[in-house]
Image (tube, rainbow, N blue to C red):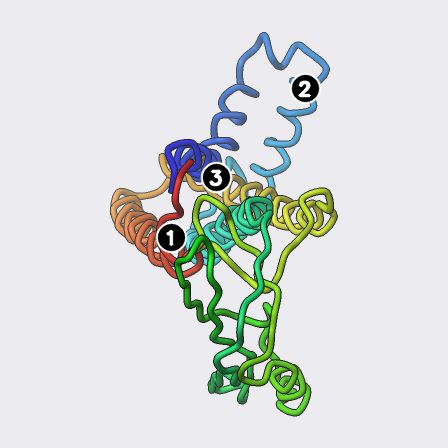
């Protein structure tokens, strides 16, 4: 990822962990509680404290809270990676502003088997020439997998070997090419995708923040043995979250994107 994207993603990850505990700390300041919005914020965290139990102690329920924290954290990198991918796709589509005639070599169905059944996606191999240089590309005809084999075969049949096709490519990087182009002026689906993912991220951040706030409030009041065990489990959750995030970003985004 480029430097700016790394900074943005890092900020989102940091906000997931620190936003609610910091707000809870701010809500405890007398000067803040004296304001209307501060009183509302203090009341909100007071309600969270009552949910957690008397004095904010989650007592024997700490394991359940940490389990939920781990499950919710799994969704955070998925949301962030989804937003990055959406902007990547839009950026690449915008840069593919030139067209050239290409020739189909072959089109076939890519098959994926799992416990839910078999799904199919049409893939195509084609070549094109720009300024005397020949480029060969293997890519998707559509962006989705489907269990409708017959329907996907119909799509493949539209691209017989030797057929002429239109290829969209980036003038300064012909390897960035595709049969699909999203008009740069049409940002409707980008806005929808990012909005839904952002809502999901905010919900996850709120949930993680509530759990962390309860955990912090209950920590001091718990026995030493429970504190040690909870710290170990919390550390395992954080390390697992970091490792999973790195793995998921690599898998979802297919490695680093070129920066410009």
Q: Quadrant of the C terminus?
A: top left
Checking the image for residue 16, the label placed there is 3
* Residue 65 at least partly seen: no
Say which of 24 and 164 sits in front: 164
Q: Report the Cα–Cα distance between label 2 and label 3.
A: 23 Å
Q: Quadrant of the N terminus?
A: top left
Q: Residue at x 60, y 45 (%)?
A: 94
Q: Which mark is nearer the camera, 1 or 2?
A: 1
Q: Report the Cα–Cα distance between label 1 and label 2.
A: 36 Å
Checking the image for residue 39, the label placed there is 2
Q: Earlier in the sequence, mark 3 or mark 1?
A: 3
Say which of 50 and 202 sits in front: 202
Q: Position of residue 59 (x, y in %)?
A: 43, 48
Kindly check if marks 2 and 3 are in contact, taking CB atoms under 8 A apart as contact.
no
Q: Position of residue 105 (x, y in %)?
A: 48, 79
Checking the image for residue 20, the label placed there is none
Say which of 28 and 141 sits in front: 141
* Residue 230 at least partly seen: yes
């Amino acid at each position: 990822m480029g430097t700016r994207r790394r900074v943005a993603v890092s900020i989102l990850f940091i906000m997931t962990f620190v936003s609610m505990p910091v707000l809870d700390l701010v809500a405890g300041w007398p000067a803040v509680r004296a304001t209307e919005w501060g009183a509302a914020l203090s009341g909100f965290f007071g309600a969270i404290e009552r949910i957690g139990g008397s004095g904010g102690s989650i007592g024997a329920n700490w394991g359940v809270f940490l389990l939920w924290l781990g499950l919710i954290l799994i969704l955070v990198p998925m949301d962030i990676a989804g937003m990055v991918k959406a902007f990547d796709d839009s950026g690449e589509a915008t840069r593919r502003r030139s067209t050239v005639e290409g020739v189909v070599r072959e089109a076939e169905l890519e098959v994926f088997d799992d416990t839910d059944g078999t799904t199919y996606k049409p893939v195509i191999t084609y070549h094109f020439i720009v300024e005397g240089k020949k480029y060969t590309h293997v890519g998707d005809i559509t962006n989705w997998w489907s269990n409708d084999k017959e329907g996907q075969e119909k799509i493949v049949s539209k691209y017989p070997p030797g057929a002429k096709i239109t290829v969209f490519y980036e003038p300064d990087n012909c390897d960035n090419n595709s049969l699909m182009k999203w008009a740069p002026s049409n940002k409707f689906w980008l806005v929808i995708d990012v909005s839904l993912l952002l809502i999901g991220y905010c919900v996850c951040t709120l949930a993680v923040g509530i759990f962390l706030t309860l955990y912090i409030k209950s920590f001091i009041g718990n026995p030493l043995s429970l504190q040690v065990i909870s710290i170990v489990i919390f550390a395992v959750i954080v390390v697992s979250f970091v490792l999973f995030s790195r793995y998921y970003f690599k898998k979802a985004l297919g490695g680093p994107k070129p920066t410009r």
